Image: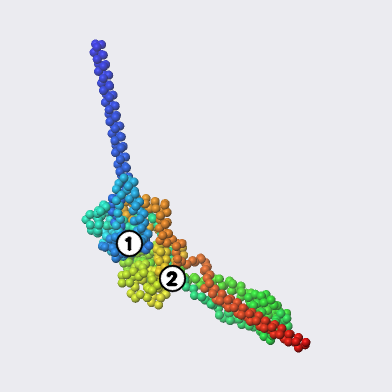
Amino acid sequence: AQHRASEDAMAARAKTRRGDQLGRWNLALILLQGVALVAIGRLAGVAAQIDFETPHCGKRFRIATHLARPFMLVDPTKCVDQRCPREAFGEDGGFTYNLMMDEILPILKRQCREAGVPDDVEFTWYIPASGRDLASNAVKMVCNGNMKDLRNVDQTSLNATFDCPANSAYSGPSNVGDCDYIGDPTCASQGPDMVAGAVHILRERLDLLDFSVPYLTVQQIVVKTRTEEPPDFMNVFKCFAFDLWAALFLEILVVWVLILLIESHANEQISKETWFAPFYDSWFWAFGSAFNAGGPGKSPVTVAGRIFMVGHYFLMALIVATYTGAFGPFLSSQGENTVKDFDSLAYDGKSVVVRGPMWDSEVPEAPFMGKHVGGNSETTTTRSTQFKLLQTTMRTDSAANFQVWTTTSMDTYWDGQLIEPRQDLDPCLVSGAILGAYDMVKCRDAITAVYYPESTIFDAPSVFYELNRRQKSTGLCELVTIGPQFSPTGFGFGFVKTAPISVPFNRAIQELMRNGTIELYRERYQIRRQDSLCSEDWMDGAEQMTIQKLFGLIVFTIIGILMSCAQGLHARWKKQDREVQERLDREAAEKEAA
């Protein structure tokens, strides 16, 4: 019995040991499975992170763009079936093109190398089949998912929008080496992969596309003709009416006659060297005391003279004070009818031309706000960012009311060809030319003018570049910027929303902003305010005084100085002749006496 009990105990201990070993093996297996799952998860996370940060690697991006100086300088005649090769961009493809090709593309390739994947990344460029200078058409190419289909939006509605079919049909960028032309069956997607150029990041576009961070902050600015200030000889006299000046001159003549009649015979201060001296000296007293009572250095000695001179001094003191108070406001009011800033367009009735559709503003339910004055656009012309800004301003401020001219472009075309500014070519005189916004403003005072807008508004960097370009080509600043910049937005790159490929581009843009490359590009293309060669300043509440405004006063002063110099020299020579004659007479008398 003891033996059996001992064997049973030994068997129980063996079974316990086997159970403990099996438990330890099970625990080790569970731990091993957990470690494997964690490792697999981490590897999957790393792979997902790499894929999230490098979706561009090994891809060819077809980029929709548009003509926009100085951002995209492309010759469309060198583009084949909308695709623009490197030759189409010439020696300088523009701010955005060079930024993409020379700065962002190398950074994207470096990102691929750092992630341990091939660094093959390519950019190919496409322009719209029509409306090649419109950023909105490049945006439509991406949204429609079709290079050819630029379905026109109904522009006769204030709230007109268009959808983005590519968000549901886009399959991502093609592989490097594929997709060489429109309709190529090797293309992963039929439409462009992104849009780049002078593309504003607007609220309505954010509903359609996934935009990068802005690579450039852009504001609007007003452009007008240069203020012409021909020398005005009579400007200093215009604040008083002619009849008032005539009355004052008559009063001085009366005082002169009274001085001659009453004071000249009794007042020793009046010169009597010659028969003409009393007339001249009395006139100096009467006229000089009109500006400063004590200036002539004379005072009346007769009772009657004191009476009428007190009246004369009192009247002239009031006139001088009145003239002083009226002269400044008079000169300031001369500039009240000019364009000063954006507010003068919104509230002072100054007209402005922008790219946008025409409409009948006289009908009871006009499609747009403001008064449409005229222009050369159509009802289907695309609404520009500036057109939308005017409408937004009037919707948010009931006091704003713009006088709007509309056009199809900022540039002027003749027979489909762009007219470049030159000294020997005036677009105002070119028969059949379709004037753009700049030249509509420039030509408003021409003999052949049919459009009369007083100003235009556009992106400030583009304006600075364009006006500088015109000044260098013609030697003139016929157009100038005026007032502060306003309504800031940003330029960015747009992508289809269902393809989250903006991350590597955002990282590249942020790197370029940190290292100062963006600022160097702004300086290179002279698109900063301080780079502008053609601008005018306006001081709120006053007008800047110029030599033209006071030209008459300067001329009269110079004439007075010259007359006094001439008279003084004549008197000196006459005195010298008299002294010589007197010396000769004395010498002759002395000889005769001897």
Q: Secondary structure at mark 2?
A: loop
Q: Position of residue 332 (x, y in %)?
A: 52, 70
Residue at image position (34%, 48%) is 111
At label 1, which amino acid type do we have? Phe
- The residue beneath circle 2 is 476
Residue at image position (30%, 32%) is 31
Write down the quadrant of residue 204 in the picture. Answer: bottom left
Q: Is residue 570 above or below residue 458?
A: below
What numbered label is drawn on residue 493?
none
Q: Is residue 582 above or below residue 141?
A: below
Residue at image position (34%, 69%) is 418
Q: Is residue 287 above or below residue 50?
A: below
Describe residue 158's horizontal placement relative to residue 80 as left or right: right
How far is mark 2 from mark 1, CA to CA?
28 Å
Residue at image position (30%, 64%) is 76
Between residues 572 and 395, which one lies in front from this camera angle? Answer: 572
- The residue beneath circle 1 is 89
Q: Secondary structure at mark 1?
A: helix
Which of marks 1 and 2 precedes in the sequence?
Answer: 1
User: Can the viewer see residue 163?
Assistant: no
